[in-house]
Image: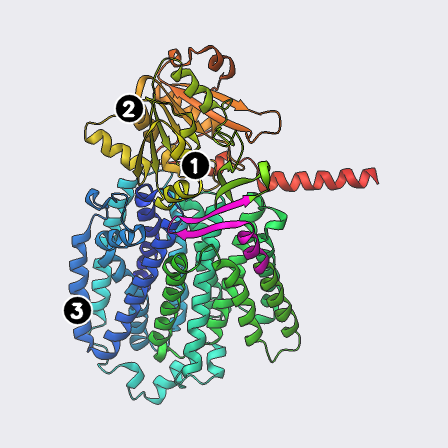
Amino acid sequence: MLLFASTILLSAFLLFLVQPIIAKQILPWFGGTSAVWTTCMVFFQVLLLAGYAYSHFVTRRLAPRQQTKLHVALLVASLAFLPIIPREALKPAGEEDAALAIIVLLAATIGLPYFLLSTTGPLVQKWVAHRFPEKTVYRLFALSNFGSLIGLLAFPFAIEPFAGSAAQSYVWSGAYALFVAACAATAWQSRNRPSAPLEFAAASPATADAAHAATHATAAALAPERRPGAGDYALWLALSALGSVMLLAATSHITQNIASVPFLWVLPLTLYLLSFVIVFEGRGGRGWYERNWLLLPALMLVVAMAWGLSAERGVLDVSIAIPLYCAGVFVACLFCHGELALRKPAPRYLTHFYLSLSLGGALGGLAVGLVAPRVFPAYFELPLALFALSALAVFLVLDSRTLIGPALVATVATGYFGWNYVEFLRNDVIVMQRNFYGTLRVREQGSGTEQVRRLLHGVILHGEQPTQGTDRLEPGTYYARSSGVGLAIAAKQARGPVKLGVVGLGIGTLSAYGRAGDTIRFYELDPDVLRVAHSHFTYLDATPARLEFELGDARLSMERELAAGRPQRYDVLAIDAFSSDSIPVHLITREAIALYVRQIAPEGIIAVHISNRFLDLKPVLANIAQAEGLVAKLVSDEPEGGGSASTTDWVLLARDRRAFDDRTLAARAEDIAPNPAYSLWSDQFNNLLDVLKSRPLDELKSLLSMRGSLEASD
């Protein structure tokens, strides 16, 4: 039994450890967007479904010795995929379908190993049910989820801080080879079990009694020999799909508001897995789920999550949003998975149950990861999921006098707040469209000379332009002439024609600085942004400068330019990718800055826009500047008057101080010193939690202090 349990534990550990390892390696290839993780999750869920389907098929259709031969052959073949390092040939060129490219890349890198890991839980549990009928096989399901949980937690705390990406891949590959040996031994031990599939075998009275004793109390009440009906399958699918949708929709919401880093991806998934452990383990294997005490907290959190989406109260602070949505995911998944645990069948129908769970999870993943971006014009998955969960709760508690009322109230409340959220997204919108990278909205507000047109990506402003008036071609918002990038461009233009590089197109505001003889090259990840900038704004069409556009991830594009022997020699290279709450970390590492230095002229300036609601990136850039021997200066701009200029922070980097000889620039730019309290960010290690501007404990202390002051004044 120890061999069986160890094999399940090791397979589950590797199954979920590989997810952040691979996702972090390919994240920079696709612009660092949170959609990369969502697409990876879709791939993992679909392959998990394939693994469960394989387990269901072979245990029903093949004799034990045939199962052993087939599985061992596949295990040996999977070793050809090692080590699991994505090939350079699979890097995107910039114009392909990103979601499809990620799926192809993952299939070529970890396809067969991941598939075989996914088969282990249900397959080995089925073998255990034959070999040890007195054992409770559903406890092995809890053990499997526990192994997955340990794998996820090991990555951010025990692996990522101490090992680079290549080392992670090699160590994982070695551990996988050990799993192949263990699983092959397990299959060999099971080769002499009864040849008839358990669900069609004629069980002896002793076997039937043992199976009955092994079934959980709730399943026993339904009679362990009863074959699941259509209603059972429908509820299994609905509950597992809704749990998957809640996980992915909330994860997307969290990462879009904070950053696309593996730690934040891992947190909701960890809670998702923990919910499985809790409801399938504890109290002698009967699970800890009790609808009567869990449903009310779940409904309250679901309503709070829906309320948090409402833009009438503004965007929630990170110290409130992350705890709220993580707690909401956890309790919602406890509800969905707890209801599944109440409805689990006898062990003889184990693969039916697991196959239904994996199918529901895959359908939920496909709905969020692939269908929603192509069907919905904006991010509607989370409000719909919250409403659906409340409505499903109503269906499940129709016979409860105490719970039906709260469930109905929650359904109405989630529907109301969700509708408010949708209405806010549509308010004053003349264009709203969505693709792999997120939702773009063009809003037109005001009238006459006060009318402005804004481009928003999610809830983040990416530029605005007056629709009339003499100043409609004047650079505003983050790019005013008094800003750091404005001063840097003016200093270089005083010497003659310039070449500007811009990472992040927005509405093309920086092209307003262009003069005849100047060249401006834009790097833009999302092709829809380029189309919208041309069709609904006039900066690009009005500039006399020569414009060039490079679609795809900026870092990959620059690497290709240098590899082709075409350094751009920019006088100013503006990196405008960090004002959003979801920042592409790979564009602000030591390696990224070193790449930018190779792209600028000898006295060129790298201008990095770091205005951000939640993150303080000054120490990150100061530490990198020291490590790379660069000069780092900060220009903080607080424009006066009623213009469109915004308060901004720009960090300017250069090889030496001669780049800042311009008198105006020198007067405004202040030196920033490195801070050893912060880590040196690299491609191998970076930590956004260190640079958060607010922390939950700080917020709590502030609220308590404010309350004390109010009470004292009263």
| Residue 610 in the image, given as x and y percentages of width and height | 47, 31
Q: Which residue is mark 1?
A: 538
Tell me which numbered mark, 2 or 3, is placed earlier along the sequence: 3
The local secondary structure at tag 2 comes to: helix
Q: Residue at x 25, y 33 (%)?
A: 559
The residue that disc 2 covers is 598
Say whether disc 1 or disc 2 marks the residue closer to the N-terminus.
1
Identity of the residue drawn at 20% across and 63% down: 184
Q: Sequence order check: which comes first, mark 1 or mark 3? A: 3
**Which image quarter is the C terminus in?**
top right
> Observer-nearest residue: 367 or 434?
434
Question: Looking at the picture, which amino acid does disc 1 mark?
Answer: Thr
Q: Which residue is mark 3?
A: 70
Q: CA distance from mark 1 to mark 2?
A: 32 Å
Mark 2–mark 3 Cα distance, whole angstroms, equals: 53 Å
Q: Is residue 424 magenta?
A: yes
Which image quarter holds the N terminus?
bottom left
In the rendered structure, which segment of residues is drawn in magenta?
Answer: 419-444
Of circles 2 and 3, the one toward us is 2
Q: Disc 2 residue type?
A: Arg
Name the kind of residue labelled 3 in the image.
Leu
